Image (tube, rainbow, N blue to C red):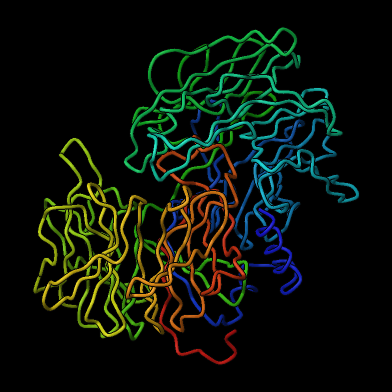
């Protein structure tokens, strides 16, 4: 976490404040990293009647806008936007006039709540290295870290008298892997209250499960929140978008007595007191929409991050407005030496850099085909697909003539056990050849520099990295379990292979010589490090890391299984690791675009 904070400081000193996205993108980076993200391609804020009807876009933009809220006098809308390149906090009048950026930083700033007197802004920021609650004095612009805890603190809410804030936090979470041994780390959250000066912090829920998005009753005596068990967290955040169950509850701050206000199946989020005896909230799923604990249901549809006006007549929410996939969008980087481009999952470039392959779905667990497209994302078409088997993680040979991928079922489902093979096709999509024998779970291949060998992982009955000679099919074990090994990638300049493994109990990045010697651990951080990829000159490794922690309540991001994942780079020896992204969505599967811009690289 301190590493991330140092990275932010370096960027500020080197580049100054991110004035606009166009300003940052104007510089020509020495490298370009393409990556995938579970973030919406674009989301806008809408203002509507209290039941969600007559929704109208509020200051729509080509970048992500989200998490809007009303000021207590109903005259302002506070919201988060990436329109200047990073997640910053803005306000504007209800008619869209008077747009003003209140918080600007290369770090992640979000989840703003204005105090009842309109003088202080509470928000979540990662500028200290993890998600904390910060307070901004709007008059003198003084900033202070209210919670300052190594864990994540989220969703601040002011008491009606402005003396207290409620928030959720994962500071007592055990961060379990569900099921045990799974790659994905979960978190639980509890509800806390603290005085606005940072004193008298106390925890008000103690169920060890998930309690989020607290909101105060009009008289300040109770908090409403949504609650779920940890297995439901897994269901809701799974990439397959399994349906889960949450409930709306209240807790009396004087007695500690709790009450469950809803029942039955379905996902219920983001409660908001509309009166002393009525709470509005939203529900998820195909039949989801605007709900209330009393009275009729509202409009059906997608309603994220709802907020109701003080008079109860209007609501704000955000939703995705661009369903196109895969995306091809430039992304502001925290280090201007490394350009970023958001694309589909598991991208791989042709040696000339003029074309790219990737998978066609939003997640590896889904049934995927291989797409071929131009390097700018145009002209996408299916290069290879199979009606029964998923073709996952394509890798283009450095000679440009062949593409390798895994072919089969990589995750155990109701259709049967995980079983997949290593497959190779020519660059035109033909000449399918299987290099393994249909007896295991093989995947994630990567080419040697001479195009003669592939390294890949096997999982299940045996855990190992194997190397196969493509022409003959002869293979040998490079390194074997009992640890789990994954995502092997071959260095372009040396006979070294990087990979991720849980050799010491935590998933870290390692390197090993292609002859199986000189095993080295490159990362040493809590949380998963994975999806490693070498730069074209072999000097850097890009990877996805969980070291920055969660930045929001995971349950508010359905089908986003690892929302802590950020894109990092480090030197080939593991030094100088620092983040390139800072958002509350899972990012991964980075690759490097081939480039001839070698001058000035360091």
The answer to whether 583 appears left or right of 367 in the picture is right
- Position in image of residue 83 (x %, y %): 60, 59
Between residue 601 and residue 223, name the one nearer to us: 601
Determine the residue located farthest toward the front in the rendered image.
517
206 in relation to 392, above or below: above
The answer to whether 475 appears left or right of 128 in the picture is left
Residue at 10%, 59% in the rendered image: 437
Question: For residue 181, which quarter of the picture?
Answer: top left
Quadrant containing the C terminus is bottom right
- Position in image of residue 430 (x %, y %): 10, 73
The answer to whether 212 appears left or right of 283 in the picture is right
Question: For residue 313, which quarter of the picture?
Answer: top right
Residue at 82%, 28% in the rendered image: 195
- Position in image of residue 591 (x %, y %): 41, 70
Between residue 163 and residue 543, name the one nearer to us: 543
Tally of marks: 0
Determine the residue located farthest toward the bottom in the rendered image.
599
The answer to whether 242 appears left or right of 581 in the picture is left
- Position in image of residue 320 (x %, y %): 45, 47
393 in relation to 504, above or below: below
Between residue 335 and residue 186, name the one nearer to us: 186
203 in relation to 438, above or below: above
Residue at 59%, 66% in the rendered image: 577
């Amino acid at each position: 976490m301190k590493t991330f904070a140092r990275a932010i400081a370096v960027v500020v000193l080197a580049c100054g404040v991110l004035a606009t996205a166009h300003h940052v993108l104007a510089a020509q980076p020495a490298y370009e990293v393409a990556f995938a993200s579970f973030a919406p391609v674009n989301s806008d804020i809408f203002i509507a009647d209290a039941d969600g009807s007559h929704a109208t876009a509020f200051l729509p933009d080509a970048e992500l806008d989200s998490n809007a809220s009303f000021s207590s006098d109903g005259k302002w809308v506070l919201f988060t936007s990436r329109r200047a390149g990073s997640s910053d906090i803005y306000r504007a009048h209800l008619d869209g006039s008077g747009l003003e950026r209140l918080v600007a930083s290369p770090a992640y700033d979000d989840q703003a709540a204005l105090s009842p007197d309109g003088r202080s802004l509470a928000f979540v920021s990662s500028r200290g290295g993890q998600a904390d609650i910060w307070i901004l004095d709007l008059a003198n612009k003084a900033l202070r870290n209210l919670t300052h805890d190594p864990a994540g603190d989220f969703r601040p809410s002011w008491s009606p008298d402005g003396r207290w804030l409620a928030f959720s936090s994962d500071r007592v979470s055990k961060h379990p892997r569900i099921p045990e041994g799974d790659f994905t780390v979960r978190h639980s959250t509890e509800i806390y209250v603290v005085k606005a000066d940072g004193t008298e912090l106390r925890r008000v829920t103690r169920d060890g499960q998930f309690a989020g998005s607290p909101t105060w009753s009009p008289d300040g005596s109770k908090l409403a929140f949504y609650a779920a068990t940890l297995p439901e967290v897994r269901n809701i955040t799974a990439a397959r978008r399994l349906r889960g169950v949450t409930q709306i509850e209240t807790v009396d701050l004087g007695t500690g007595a709790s009450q469950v206000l809803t029942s039955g199946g379905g996902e219920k989020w983001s409660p908001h007191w509309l009166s002393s005896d009525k709470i509005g909230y939203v529900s998820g799923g195909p039949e989801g929409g605007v709900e209330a604990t009393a009275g009729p249901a509202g409009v059906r549809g997608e309603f994220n991050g709802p907020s109701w006006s003080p008079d109860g007549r209007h609501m704000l929410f955000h939703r995705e407005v661009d369903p196109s996939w895969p995306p091809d969008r430039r992304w502001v980087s925290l280090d201007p030496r490394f350009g970023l481009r958001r694309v589909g999952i598991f991208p791989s470039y042709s040696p000339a850099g003029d074309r790219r392959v990737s998978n066609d779905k939003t997640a590896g667990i889904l049934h995927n085909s291989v797409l071929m497209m131009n390097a700018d994302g145009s002209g996408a078409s299916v290069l290879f697909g199979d009606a029964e088997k998923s073709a996952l993680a394509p890798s283009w040979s450095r000679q440009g003539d062949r593409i390798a991928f895994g072919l089969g079922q990589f995750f155990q489902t109701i259709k049967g056990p995980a079983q997949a093979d290593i497959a190779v096709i020519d660059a035109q999509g033909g000449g399918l050849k299987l290099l393994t024998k249909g007896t295991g779970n093989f995947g994630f291949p990567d080419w040697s520099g001479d195009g003669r060998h592939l390294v890949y992982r096997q999982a299940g009955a045996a855990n190992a990295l194997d190397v196969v000679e493509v022409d003959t099919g002869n293979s040998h074990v490079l390194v074997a379990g009992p640890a789990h090994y994954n995502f092997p990638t071959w260095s372009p300049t040396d006979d070294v292979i990087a990979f991720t493994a849980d050799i010491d109990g935590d998933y870290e990045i390692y390197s090993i010589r292609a002859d199986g010697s000189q095993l080295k651990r490159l990362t040493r951080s809590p949380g998963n490090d994975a999806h490693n990829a070498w730069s074209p000159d072999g000097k850097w490794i890009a990877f996805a890391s969980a070291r920055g922690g969660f930045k929001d309540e995971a349950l508010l991001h359905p089908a986003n299984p690892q929302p802590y994942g950020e894109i990092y780079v480090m030197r080939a020896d593991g030094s100088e690791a620092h983040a390139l992204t800072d958002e509350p969505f899972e990012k991964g599967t980075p690759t490097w675009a081939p480039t001839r811009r070698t001058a000035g690289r360091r």
